Image (cartoon, rainbow, N blue to C red):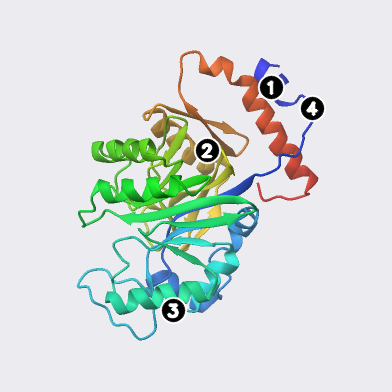
Amino acid sequence: MSVYSALLWTVLAVAPVNDEIVLVAVGDVMLARGVGEKIRRCGTEHPFSDVARVLESADVGFCNLECVLADEARPQSNGFVFKANPILAHTLRHAGFDLVSVANNHTLDCGTAGFRETIRILRHSGIIPILAEPIVKKVRGIRLGLCAFNLVGRHQTSEVMIRAVKELEATSDVVIVSLHWGIEYTLSPSTQQLRLAKQLVDSGADLILGHHSHRVQGIGSYKDRFIVYSLGNFLFDQRDPLGNETVMLLIKLTRAGVRRITIVPAVIVNFRPERAFNKLGHAILARLIDSSARLNTQVVKVFHEGMVLGRIYPFQEEMDVERIADIAWRNHVRRISKNSTRF
């Protein structure tokens, strides 16, 4: 038996930790077009039914809403228009999404009227829409500072974003920035994204959640903060294999920031996300491990999941063996004790 295996299966005492919450973060959620038709045929609980236990295991849920929720507003774009039934806001809330970024290139598909209706409907359903204006939400005593920016097709200045982050740093325990950015269908962030991420971390951001590329991209780390460059699609009707690969991030937060990130691989099948096990799940994790390593961040596979360890240092693999085993065993014991198959 290897040193890793011996440590992994050593029984460790598990002590409860206070003042921690878990945020589940996923990528693009689009409720129109083929997804909307599927929901009409299969019911409003169908979209997230296969991943419901993962979503429900968290204290708070985040996604990027890549559509308008409106009845009367008319399309104002000559390109793709994603307009969904407003009743589906309840589907989002029932699935566990409390925080929704509406800062993206489809926010104004139905003009300002559609945008305002979307905001109103989300709030009426108990969901907090996130935009550029900084907001603070307290979850079990931890103050989450939140802001979101759309950098696609717009020239949002870094000064505006930095000012919002600094404002949140002064009033929050954990600062989370949602960014709709990058280049579609690419597997790596651009030089401009790398530069902006560092600027925002230097200004006080603890966690950056990116989306828009329709691909899962690597996770970076800088000053012990984390940059998720792209979460990929999560609920979408694209048909290409890479576009259907996705992840759910279970992010443990304390008042000091991000304590741990667990990666749960998933795949979109017939326009809805499902857990990915066996070869496909391993392939998704392998690609994420490789792309994160290119960003100088170590991700390892533990059972059917990934775990983000942070910046890669010399000799880190040997140093982290015991840490990996400790965390893996704690997660294993917790799941067995709940008699759950969700992981």
Which numbered disc, 3 or 1, marks the residue closer to the eye? Answer: 3
Q: Which residue is mark 2?
A: 282
Bin the neighbour count of mark 2 within 10 Å (Cα to Cα): few under 14, some 14-19, many 20 and up.
some
Q: Could you tell me the amino acid type at mark 1?
A: Ser
Q: Quadrant of the N terminus?
A: top right
Q: Which residue is mark 4?
A: 11
Q: Secondary structure at mark 3?
A: loop
C-alpha separation, residue under disc 3 versus residue under disc 1: 50 Å
The percent position of residue 60, horizontal first and vertical second, equals: 58, 56
C-alpha separation, residue under disc 1 versus residue under disc 4: 12 Å
Bin the neighbour count of mark 4 within 10 Å (Cα to Cα): few under 14, some 14-19, many 20 and up.
few
Along the polypeptide, which appears first: circle 1 or circle 4? 1
C-alpha separation, residue under disc 4 versus residue under disc 2: 26 Å
C-alpha separation, residue under disc 3 versus residue under disc 4: 50 Å
Along the polypeptide, which appears first: circle 4 or circle 2? 4
Bin the neighbour count of mark 1 within 10 Å (Cα to Cα): few under 14, some 14-19, many 20 and up.
few
Q: Which residue is mark 1?
A: 5
Q: Is residue 241 visible?
A: no
Residue furthest bottom in the image:
72
Q: Which residue is mark 3?
A: 85
Q: Could you tell me the amino acid type at mark 3?
A: Asn
Please, is residue 169 above or below residue 41 in the view? Answer: above
The percent position of residue 316, horizontal first and vertical second, equals: 52, 17
Residue in view at x 27 percent, y 53 percent = 151
Residue in view at x 80 percent, y 44 percent = 337
The percent position of residue 121, horizontal first and vertical second, equals: 46, 76
Please, is residue 277 above or below residue 43 in the view? Answer: above
Q: Secondary structure at mark 2?
A: helix
Q: Nearer the viewer, residue 278 or 76?
A: 76
